[in-house]
Image: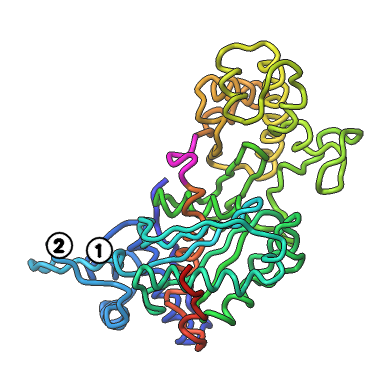
Amino acid sequence: MSATANVKKTSGKSMRNVKRENRSLLLTQLYFQGRKSRTSLARELRLTPASITQTIGSMIREGIVVETDAYASDAGMGRRQQFIDLNHADLHAIGVTITNDRVRLCISNLRFDCVYEDSWRLESQDAESYADFFCDKIAFGMLASRLRKDDIVGIGVTVRGNVDSEHGVSENSFGLLPEHSAIKAELEGRIGIPVAVDNHIRSLMTCEALSSRSYMENSLLIKYGPGIGSAIALDGEIYSGGHSMAGEIGHMIMDRDGEVCRCGKRGCLETIASFRAMRARIRRGDCDSLATLLRRFEEGDPEVAAAVAASIRHLALAIANMAVLFDPKDIILYGEPFGSGIFLGEFTREVGARASELQGLLRVSSRNLLLDRHMACALAVHAFLEAGDIADLGKPSLPRVPPAE
């Protein structure tokens, strides 16, 4: 799907909001479609040449956009115009991914080229004082990368479970962090850089859109392996629902008398179609990892094939039900099982058996298994494009730096 920035109505808005929206539209257009001349940007965004000139001038001075060494020919005026582009090389995003008992830190430029990485175990004592600990790690990474606060467009934090993305609060991460952890407020108050927070699955969808430069108008993303999750895009925006729980396909009840799920309900899709559920059905041999299970499935092991087939049937049914509710234009598949041609073929056939019209909507992410590394950075980049600016929160540039070991 082609990537375009929506042109929004500005009537009734203050001039400050209009300018901010114009900046956001301009940055989004450059990010998704690449470098443009001033004339092209004015025409595509329906802005006056004077407005474009003023907006671009201020953003050049701020180091957000740059004039390139390439030119465009303006057929109407008979003259060349210099291309404008985002300052991809100098601007950076910081990503913090909290998964199971580990935390990953990545600092990348706007093209998601990583310039610094670190990871560490999240011990129980760290969870209580996570904000200080994370800020120390971020500070060290910025110093090691020779980056200043002005070089950072924002910090993205992804964590599993129920996340209130509007307020940046991890409501329930199933034991990784304390309940109701105000991640956004805690980190912004210490480091003075804007922070965006969301759960893993919605972050994956954000990263899919940004890294592939695709505008997801109405899309459904399915993450499969080892657990099951989904995210929904409606009218170009990721939908989180009234309680930040939208898209929790893994907790769709499939058997009201089934096993108790970790969420407390009975018979959730996770209990009958996840890797754990498949492994529980296999009595012969060792399937201690999803990779091992998939290998045995591809080799034709009958016991594994039966376990996988049962999970595929339930997953296909859940997706067919979600598709009825949201009517997606495409269904993006992400996860290790979808990298197996045999698994994908059987899954596609099963979906077709449930709803033949969905087969043509299925596609495996072009960056399957590669988005996890950058999804937290993508959150920060997305928030930057939405804001149209690098916010200065007026706090210290860096927290304290841990002593060298």
* The furthest residue to the front: 405
- The prevailing secondary structure element of the residues shown in magenta is loop
Residue at image location 56% in from the left, 68% down from the top:
196
Tag 2 secondary structure: strand
Highlighted range, magenta: 364-370
* The furthest residue to the right: 257
Location of residue 304 (image quadrant): top right
Residue at image location 51% in from the left, 74% down from the top:
402
Amino acid of disc 1 = Lys
Circle 1/circle 2 CB separation < 8 Å: yes
Amino acid of disc 2 = Ala
Q: x%, y% of residue 253? A: 82, 39
From the image, tell me which residue sits under label 1: 36
Q: x%, y% of residue 61? A: 28, 83
Q: x%, y% of residue 36? A: 25, 63
Q: x%, y% of residue 218? A: 55, 48
